[in-house]
Amino acid sequence: MCAAIYAARNGAKVTIIEKNTQLGKKLSMTGNGRCNLTNLDMREEYYNAAARGRMKEWLSTFGVEDVISFFKSLGVVVKSEDGYIYPMSGQASTVVKALENEIDRLGIEVVYSEQLKGIEKATEAWDYVVKTDKGRYEADAVILAVGSLSGAKSTMSTGDGYYICKKLGMTVKDTYPALVGFKCAPEENMPSSGVRITAEVSFVLGKETLASEYGEVQLTSEGISGIPVMQASRDVIRFVAEKKPVYAVIDCFPDYDDKDFEALKADMIRLKDERSLDEFLLGFCNSNITDMVLSRMKLSRSMKMKNISVSMAQCILDNFRALRLKIDDSFGYQASQVTSGGISLGDIGSDFAFKQDPGIFCIGELVDVDGRCGGYNLQWAFTSGSIAGTAASL
Ligand SMILES: Cc1cc2nc3c(=O)[nH]c(=O)nc-3n(C[C@H](O)[C@H](O)[C@H](O)COP(=O)(O)OP(=O)(O)OC[C@H]3O[C@@H](n4cnc5c(N)ncnc54)[C@H](O)[C@@H]3O)c2cc1C
């Protein structure tokens, strides 16, 4: 939508071919329905390694302020929540509607419920023939903005762009669901009801720490999720997909350094008397986490503390500092917010044109660019969309 608007504002006659029955289905679901458009804390290192080197140039052409001005030009006022930019309305639906209104105003034609199948070189007046499941369109430039594999079924994110681009001769990097939660191994005794705790979660493979994040971690009967898990997932997912033995290590006392935690343990152990293990741990941590720790250690809540050795008591408490959970798999593409991998940036010029055929452009999530959670992926969609839309109309 952004690319179409930029191309049309620049004088091009634009047609959007949309396979869904509506435009911006995924956009309407972003930010829990609030649409986190971008972030004032914008850095190249918040994107995947393959993209970082080129992000500076792209963000200096169309950065955070440009996104804000673009939406202002559509009548969407924004607000910052600790740097996270949302529409003032707090409704993603208003963002989609504002884009649709501009598309209407600019006379952009929108064809719904039609699926792009391929692009071929034309032989006559036009450069390209765009083939769909229902017909064919002639064009002198084509912008592929068909997204990825991530998102609920209703977003129709089925990764069509990958095979279309492969046929055109582009390299498609392996894809993985990213910004996603993880299933834990069945033996991990996950809590039957959901738990949210402020924690530091690290993902380890052997001795290597793959990622560490702090924030509200959610544990359910199936696995772990929440913002810190999703943020870390981008650095972890490849190893999980390769079935490597990855563990999540949850520190339920992230605000304690090692010395403070040792002191806390010593204070607790002074309470070792006639009381039961249940009473001993009552106020230590969330009771569902305690249940988990005790069932994993096969300990009965009714055990008397006086019958538990000091080293055993320390071991129990240490479990809250480093609760190790074996990761089985991710929750998959439909539960993910973004797909890592996609069209290789090596094939794409600075205006997002395919280097071998510069009338074809690739943008947004289709390309091998993914960012952290927090507005970075929509920023990328708007950055690449505006630059490609402008270039395609020249
Ligand atoms: C639940 C959820 C929440 C998110 N929240 C945020 C957030 O708050 N902030 C943020 O920055 N990012 C967020 N994201 C990520 C963000 O939504 C995406 O990165 C962004 O929408 C990608 O834009 P895109 O235009 O490349 O792809 P999409 O938004 O997926 O759009 C692709 C379009 O192409 C159409 N299409 C696909 N194949 C074909 C075909 N063959 N023919 C015709 N049309 C086709 C699709 O129907 C769709 O309309 C979220 C993602 C999800 C799933």
Image (cartoon, rainbow, N blue to C red):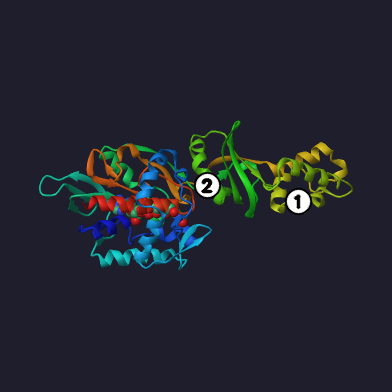
List the residue tagged with mark 2.
231
Closer to us: 285 or 352: 352
Closer to us: 348 or 217: 348
Q: In the image, 113: left or right of 186?
A: left
**Above or below — where is 207 with respect to 322?**
above
Q: Which amino acid does label 1 sit on?
A: Phe
List the residue tagged with mark 1.
284
Disc 1 packing (10 Å; few <14; some 14–19; many ≥20): few
Q: In the image, 352: left or right of 224?
A: left
Which of pointers 2 and 1 indicates the residue nearer the eye?
2
**Is ligand 1 closer than 8 angstroms to the Cβ of mark 2?**
no
Q: In the image, 371: left or right of 354?
A: right
Q: Which amino acid does label 2 sit on?
A: Gln
Q: Residue at x 40, y 39 (%)?
A: 53
Q: Would you say residue 67 is visible in this rendering?
A: yes
**Is ligand 1 closer than 8 angstroms to the Cβ of mark 1?**
no
Q: Residue at x 37, y 65 (%)?
A: 72
